């Protein structure tokens, strides 16, 4: 195996180990020693790829962005033909995916911002663009914004371990948020 392939595999193992630690033990337990143990590699091997914990956090955020970009593109390709509010549907589906995926890459965000709160500013800009896009396509921009925030609220409560809803209740509520026809009729009332 060549060095590039080995390096890429080590990087993937480290990212998965970091996600496992954050999901299982919380972001505060994410250390280079813990990552090396979880990944089954030496600390030297880890530090060859990532010199600092901040470098691991940055890699987690990049991984998270790639994962959800691909998920969004795949979902949007389907939603554009079936939903009058394809951008909104896609964003709600992304929130659902982040909640329901084991070792969700959304934990990467949680881990990164707990260590570097300044990273939130990047997400604020991204979210502002998402809201602008979904409002532009919506018949009722305020209702679309409320639906987006409801989905994000369920996501954040779940990530923080504060969601009292059962998995079934949460899935049912995500289904309702995704049901554009239901919301179109209620906005006309």
Image: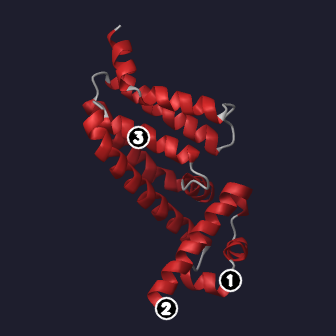
Q: Residue 151: x, y in percent?
A: 50, 34
Q: Name the residue under label 3.
A: 91
The residue sitting at the top extreme is 189
Residue at the spot x=51%, y=37% of the render?
Answer: 152
51 lies above or below 166: below
Q: Where is residue 79 in the image (x, y as percent from the top left)?
A: 32, 39
Q: Is residue 108 left or right of residue 189?
A: right
Give the mark, 2 or 1, whose residue is nearer the N terminus.
2
- Cα separation, mark 2 vs mark 1, equals 21 Å
Q: Considering only order in the chain, which callout, 2 or 3, is on the residue closer to the N terminus?
A: 2
Describe the element under mark 3 as helix, strand or loop.
helix
User: Callout 2: helix, strand or loop?
Assistant: loop
Provide the residue designation for mark 1: 43
Gap between marks 3 and 2, in whole Å?
A: 39 Å
Mark earlier in primary sequence (3, 1)? 1
- Classify mark 1: residues with Cα within 10 Å, few (<14), some (14-19) or many (20+): some
Q: Where is residue 29 in the image (x, y as percent from the top left)?
A: 73, 62
Query: How does the figure colour the protein chain or chains?
Result: secondary structure
Q: Nearer the viewer, residue 157 or 99?
A: 99
**Can residue 132 be seen?**
no
Q: Which residue is drawn at 66% across and 58% down?
A: 22
Q: Is mark 1 on a helix, strand or loop?
A: helix
Question: Is 19 left, or right, of 4 in this rendering?
Answer: right
The residue shown at (29%, 27%) is: 138
Give above or below for 162 relative to 66: above
Mark 2 lies on residue: 1
């Amino acid at each position: 195996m060549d060095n590039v392939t080995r390096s890429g595999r080590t990087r993937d193992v480290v990212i998965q180990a970091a996600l496992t630690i954050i999901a299982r033990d919380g972001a505060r337990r994410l250390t280079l020693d813990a990552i090396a143990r979880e990944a089954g590699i030496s600390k030297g091997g880890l530090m060859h790829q990532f010199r600092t914990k901040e470098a691991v956090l940055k890699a987690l955020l990049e991984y998270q962005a790639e994962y959800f970009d691909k998920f969004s593109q795949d979902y949007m390709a389907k939603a554009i033909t079936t939903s009058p509010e394809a951008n909104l549907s896609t964003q709600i589906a992304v929130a659902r995916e982040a909640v329901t995926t084991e070792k969700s890459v959304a934990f990467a965000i949680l881990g990164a911002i707990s260590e570097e709160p300044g990273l939130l500013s990047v997400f604020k800009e991204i979210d502002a663009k998402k809201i602008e896009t979904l409002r532009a396509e919506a018949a009722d921009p305020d209702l679309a914004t409320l639906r987006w925030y409801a989905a994000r609220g369920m996501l954040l409560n779940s990530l923080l371990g504060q969601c009292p809803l059962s998995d079934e209740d949460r899935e049912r509520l995500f289904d309702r948020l995704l049901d554009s026809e239901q919301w179109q009729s209620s906005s006309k009332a």
